[in-house]
Image: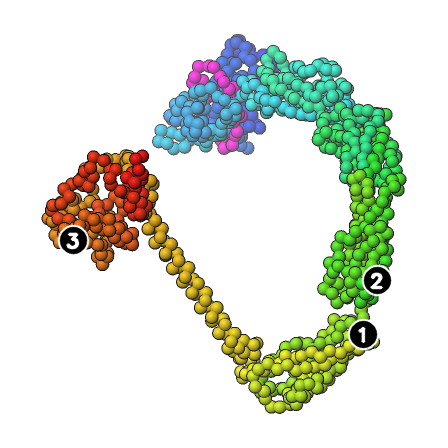
Amino acid sequence: FRVSEEGAVYTLRRLALVGSEEAVDVVYLQFQLFQVILKLSLKETPIRPISVKPSDAMLTQQVPEILFPWRSLDVRGDGTVRRVKRDWVIPPINVPENSRGQFPEELVRIRSDRDKNRLLRYSVTGPGADQPPTSIFIINPISGQLSVTKPLDREHIFNFHLRAHAVDLNGNQVENPIDIVINVIDQNDNRPEFTHTIFNGSVPEGSKPGSFVMTVTAVDKDDPKTANGMLRYKILSQNPQSPSSSMFTINNKTGDIITVAAGLDREKVTQYTLIIQATDMEGNPTYGLSNTASTVIRITDINDNPPEFTTDTFFGEVHENRVNVIVANLTVTDKDQPHTSAWSAAYRIITGDPTGRFSIPTDHTTNEGLLTVIKPIDFELTRSFMLTVEAENEVPLARGVHLPRQSTATVSVRILDINESPEFSPNPKSIKLEEGLPAGSLLTTFTAQDPDRFLRQTVRYSKMYDPANWLEIDQVNGRISTIAILDRESPYVKNNFYNVTFMASDNGIPPASGMGTLQMYLLDINDNAPHVFPPEVEMCEKPDPNAINVTASDPDLTPNAGPFAFELANRPSDVRRNWTLNRLNGEYAQLRLRIGSLASGIYKVPIMITDSGNLPMSNTSYLKVKVCQCDHHGDCVDMERIIAAGLGTGAIIAILICIIILLVLVLLFVMWMKRRDKERQAKQLLIDPEDDVRDNILKYDEEGGGEEDQDYDLSQLQQPDALEPECVKVGIRRMDERPLHHDHQYPLRSAAPHPGDIGDFIHEGLKAADNDPTAPPYDSLLVFDYEGSGSDAGSLSSLHSFSSSGDQNYDYLGEWGPRFRKLADLYGGGDD
């Protein structure tokens, strides 16, 4: 026998059992490397080579038997034989996945050589047996037959590690456990799967053949070491098939896509779509499984198309002196992808603009060149420009591409004349002169020139800004003269400078005007006398020290100011008697009090000060000394400060009188407001009868519940003589009204009134009601007087018992006031 590297056992010569001297039906082979013994049963039929792999065992319909021969023979020196323990390794058992045989399917038989003497029990442990996933492998405990119970899936579990055990009936270990490895043999039961349904890639246009584009990838769950998991790629289709049907190829093993033909042009074909197929079994179209995916290859743009002007010559015009004005729009075309650096154009002026008066920025939306004036142009100097411009892309052109003639154009620019403003020169104009010039003095001539020298226009001058109103200008010749004395000490003069603005206007259409500034520097002269500073000081009644330092203030400049000479005036005579003035230096003098104290009050000390001008100026100014009572810190008390400030008793009284007058005015205003409210309430009672709404019908949404819901005291409608005496009042009010004032008395009639006094009685009652602030409204019941239980007149109808009213005179009704105006109109209007 011999064994191959793969573990297959072969016979070296033909085994003939028939006729042999010794019948041999079992052969034990011991492998030194694995330390295992293989038991072969010899039959009369030829036996194929047996491998330890389960697949070969099944082909021979033989179940390999795995023994527990942990002892081997060792020959001693004296010729005796003894058993020696040895470790051995069981080769892996291979089981194909997805088996469709009958289950349980026998794999191997495990037995020990000690089962001849006693009964043994066999078992297996490990994942797939007694550990999850359980019950995949089972073993006959008596025969040691190991079987698989279900189909296996290599993609789920590719091998199992089990341990075989042999024990006696008492559970004692008879053999050391042996390791059994069961490998799941792969079958081609999985199709290739691409990692993406659609692959995206790109390649620049104009790429040479052999340029890498992208890589597509597919995976197969089958064993990659076998043909089941070995994939091959190929391109099934290309769309569009322009300019060739085979623009790309793919590496069948790696999936790398490369170009194989020239002619990629984005301006013609922007993208290609490829259908890629992946097949396992090393691409065998008969036995392999396949799958497809799409690949989109985008052709990216390169700068292979230069910009070209739409015309050879552009025209534009612009007014002179205008800046930041677009003169012309330069348009180009570029076949490259829009809004990319290969499409965006950059413009430059080659010739025609030596002074740099134009620029051409790019409109990034339209890619147009905007010819713009950036410096003013004078029509009188240049009336037209002829520019040569060139357009290029922001990135250089691709190799081998050159700018064509259409990338250069000519721009003709015409300058338009406008009426320009006259210009003063120099502007501003500075002059230097002394202050104090009298009115009418000629200062200078300030003229302007009209830039429109080809037009004969007249220039007129006027004054625009002269805050002190010192100057005037001749409107024809521009001569400037004074109309007031110049004073350097004026508040309008800043740092000896005084500025006046003039305007020059021409008579063009439309007229134009320009401004010019005359800047005068005024030289100082001694025209201001000094005065004492500070003008007011404070001193205590008993000063300690009793000296005050003063100085002089002179608006003039040196040498027309200090040093100063200080001297007390001779008058009044008590000045020199109470005060002394000593000169400390050319700027300060010290005023001292000769006497020990002064009464509180204000004292004016005259001091004569002389400056140092070429013609010295003197001035006697009064130093206001406020003498007051001081506290222990030497500060004046507040009340003394008020008295010293000049607020005497008269001023305080005047302030108090003003406060009282203000309070009286406020009180009068309040009284007037109350009186107006009373008059407004009285006017509401004296409503014009024509405006009276009592005769109108007022409709309400709710009728109410009857008399029980009213708040009126219906007992007042009874016979007055049945009422209590205290209930008989001149008016009965609603319960929701304010209570009546009991002190207000209405007129009373006698029990037997004379028929002629009804008018007087009504007048008196009316006046009483008008003057009563608590008078009831119209819809209240009014009781003016109680006339008794009977009436001499019978009923009211007896007042008019004649058949005609012609004999009755009702003119007196018009004298009763506005309340009886309607009655007077009815009865006093004559026959009408």
Write down the residue under mark 1: 559
| Cα gap from disc 3 to disc 1, whole angstroms | 111 Å
Q: Between residue 631 and residue 431, name the one nearer to us.
A: 431
Q: Residue at x 87, y 40 (%)?
A: 455
Neighbour class for label 2 at 10 Å: few (<14), some, many (≥20)?
A: some
First reached walking from the N terminus: tag 3 or tag 1: 1
Q: Nearer the viewer, mark 1 or mark 2?
A: 2
Write down the residue under mark 3: 750
Numbered disc 3: secondary structure: loop
- The answer to whether any part of residue 160 appears in the image is yes
Q: Between residue 443 and residue 427, name the one nearer to us.
A: 443
Q: Quadrant of the N terminus?
A: top right
Q: Single out the residue that lies furthest toward the front.
A: 807
Q: Residue 46 at x, y = what percent? A: 54, 10
Write down the residue under mark 2: 441
- The amino acid type of the residue labelled 1 equals Pro
Q: Between residue 561 and residue 761, name the one nearer to us.
A: 761
- Is the residue 42 above or below the residue 815 in the image? above
- The amino acid type of the residue labelled 3 equals Ser
Give the left or right position of residue 666, taking residue 753 as reference.
Answer: right
- The question of residue 143 being in magenta is answered with no
